[in-house]
Image (cartoon, coloured by chain):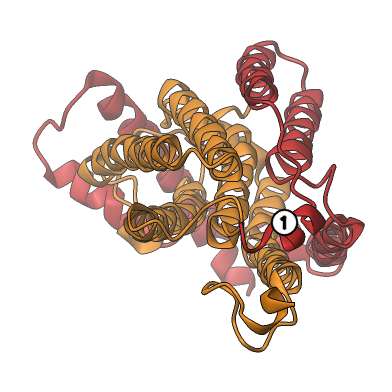
Amino acid sequence: MKESLTHPSYLHHHYGDVDQQREAAKLGMWLFLVTEVLFFGGLFCVYAIYRAWYPELFVNAHHALDWRLGGINTLVLIASSVTMALAIRSFQVDKQKLAIGMMFATVMLAATFMVIKYFEYAHKFHVGQLPGKFYTYTGIEGTNPHIFFSIYFAMTGLHGIHVIIGIGVILWLMSKARKGSYHSGYYTPIEVTGLYWHLVDLVWIFLFPLFYLIG
Amino acid sequence: MTDSHSQSEHKDHILPVKLYLSVGAVLFFLTIVTVAASRIDLGQFNLIVAMVIAIVKASIVGLFFMHLLWDRRFYMSAMLMSVLFLGVFIIITMSDTMRRGDIYEEVRHPIVKDAAMYKDIDKSKNDAHGVDSHDDAQAAEGNEAESDAEKDSQEHDTPTH
């Protein structure tokens, strides 16, 4: 009886119980992910249109990308997805220390991804493989290779912004987790952030073959 | 624990660590497969193979890491719905863009294929003194020859307009 009068600190007043709160948060995150799919979808549509229009352009220009770096980045992001999933699991079984370690590993892997991306971008900036009118490189055969780099920078750039936001959110949650905010009874913020993080991984799973592994 | 009753109601899918690790291993393996597949020349099927592998990987991430396999079916249907609408979006848009040449002759056979800015790039390339590699120089020559040819064709075309 006493339980029904008091409620845990993490339960907000406008929810009936912890489960309702958790389901509402997850529903909200899933609907956000739906909008994210459509957000990236616009760019995937651009990609599809231009690749159908200029198939040789994509084949010629994609040789400027290093599939090894793209491949390593794919593995790095998959590994970060594993550590994020393990972080959630660790909270489920009340191993907070391990969970924080797993979140830290996720952040480090995400940072590795961004560092590799930085080197790729820096090289392209250096040789002038830039989007649209900023394109000045002359080493690629065929017509209009700048179109490839416009789409490349738009898609990987938007994805990179998502990775940076993910790093920020996970660091913020880590600082709260250190204060003991999350445990087996309440770990919803970690769970929904995990969903977001997996979507970021998922987008890259498509970007990698579409840009680095053409023909 | 004060919230033990609510905890038992939780649909808490605590999965074994081993499962997460093996799912990760499968994803690693499929990444290697997709790289290997891209090195075999299958013509148009390369794209299809790459996309099939990507869809399998994405499904694995969704089903296991995002817990769609155990969670409420509503989340799965929301996700599938977004993919469905993305498909509608792309197919309808491309049914337009892929048929534009049917109406406009200049879309099917553009007179000048390169964007206008490439003329400036070629010019600055000629002014610059021996930029990096030998290959670049050759490609630049190729471009120049091409754009010259285009200029010619333009000149021939203009009187008729």
Q: Is residue B152 visible?
A: no
Q: Colour of chain A?
A: orange
Query: Residue at coordinates 35% horizontally, 40% vertically from top-left?
Result: A104
Query: Residue at coordinates 72% horizontally, 64% vertically from top-left?
Result: A30
In front here: A160 or B90?
A160
* Residue A49 appears left or right of B35: right
Mark 1, other Cα within 10 Å: few <14 / some 14–19 / many ≥20:
some
The kind of secondary structure element at disc 1 is helix
The quarter of the image holding the N terminus of chain B is: bottom right
In front here: A190 or B121?
A190
Q: Which residue is mark 1?
A: B7
* Residue A128 appears left or right of B27: left
Q: Is residue A152 visible?
A: yes
Q: Quadrant of residue B29?
A: top right
Query: Residue at coordinates 24% horizontally, 42% vertically from top-left?
Result: A122
Q: Quadrant of residue A4?
A: bottom right
Up-down relation of residue A33 to residue A215 (above or below):
below
Q: Quadrant of residue A90?
A: top right
Up-down relation of residue A173 to residue A94 (above or below):
below
* Residue B19 appears left or right of B103: left
| Residue A142 place in picture, x, y as percent | 51, 38
Query: Residue at coordinates 33% horizontally, 37% vertically from top-left?
Result: A108
Up-down relation of residue B101 to residue B26 (above or below):
below
Q: Residue furthest bottom?
A: A14
| Residue B96 place in picture, x, y as percent | 84, 67
In front here: A39 or A43?
A39
* Amino acid type, mark 1: Gln
